[in-house]
Image (spheres, coloured by chain):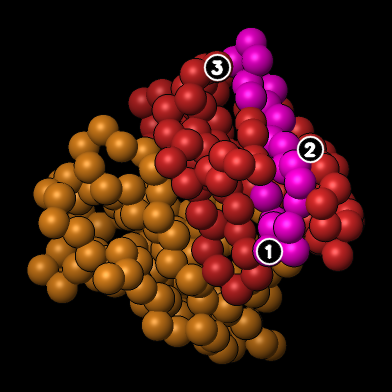
Amino acid sequence: AQKITQTQPGMFVQEKEAVTLDCTYDTSDPSYGLFWYKQPSSGEMIFLIYQGSYDQQNATEGRYSLNFQKARKSANLVISASQLGDSAMYFCAMREGENTDKLIFGTGTRLQVFP
Amino acid sequence: EAGVAQSPRYKIIEKRQSVAFWCNPISGHATLYWYQQILGQGPKLLIQFQNNGVVDDSQLPKDRFSAERLKGVDSTLKIQPAKLEDSAVYLCASRTSGMWEQFFGPGTRLTVL
């Protein structure tokens, strides 16, 4: 079974609108963490946001927020007020286990922001 | 603060040749990772170092891939001999203790002909 599933190969959003990128995960370990990374065409993976499984509140970082629904095993990324520079690939990733930092990545979602 | 540095950025070789990639992590980051990212996929961990010791190399094809991190700072990843299926972007990342996020370099895009 896939550990991280991103079902949207591509998404379009108009500038200044909000967009949600979906991510579901599969683990039986009670301790885990979820990450979102942005990969522009230049290739570098840019860390956006992190959510620990025991965190009580949804993580937020500027225009990025993580909609963490533990019972549904989903960790969707919400980008508010999209900008043209947000056009990129977005990857959801998970570390699984209390002391592990090994990341398992999904296949990514390509976001395109249009004027 | 300088980010993770990698070189070269691009490399084209023929199959059966050898190639080496270099990574300089963020200063003070004890943990270093090498990932392979095949086109259309997410990165896959090849090897993880803690200082100059290997923590996890379970997914490293050891018959052709090798990596070292002498002195616990810079690292090199080598492929010998290369196969067509090794064409990918090789990403290096580093992490400091106490934080979970990994910081990535720009990657090396390898094309094997």
The chain displayed red equals: B
| Distance in Å between CA atoms under marks 1 and 2 | 16 Å
Residue at 64% x, 34% y: name it: B66
The residue labelled by disc 2 is: B20
Judging from the image, mark 3 belongs to the subunit labelled B
- The x and y percentages for residue B30 are 51, 21
Mark 1 crowd level (few <14, some 14–19, many ≥20, 10 Å Cα): few
B26 sits left or right of B9 in the view: left
A31 sits left or right of B41 in the view: left
Report the span colored magenta: B68-90
Location of residue B100 with respect to A58 vertically, above or below: above
The residue labelled by disc 1 is: B85
> N-terminal of the two: label 2 or label 3?
2
- The x and y percentages for residue A15 are 60, 83
Task: Report helix, strand or loop for mark 1.
Answer: helix
Q: Amino acid at mark 2?
A: Ala
On whether disc 2 and disc 3 are found on a single subunit, the reply is: yes
Is residue B76 found inside the magenta-colored segment of the image?
Answer: yes
On whether disc 1 and disc 2 are found on a single subunit, the reply is: yes
Name the disc covering residue B52, or none.
Answer: 3
Task: Report helix, strand or loop for mark 2.
Answer: strand
Q: Amino acid at mark 1?
A: Glu
Judging from the image, mark 1 belongs to the subunit labelled B
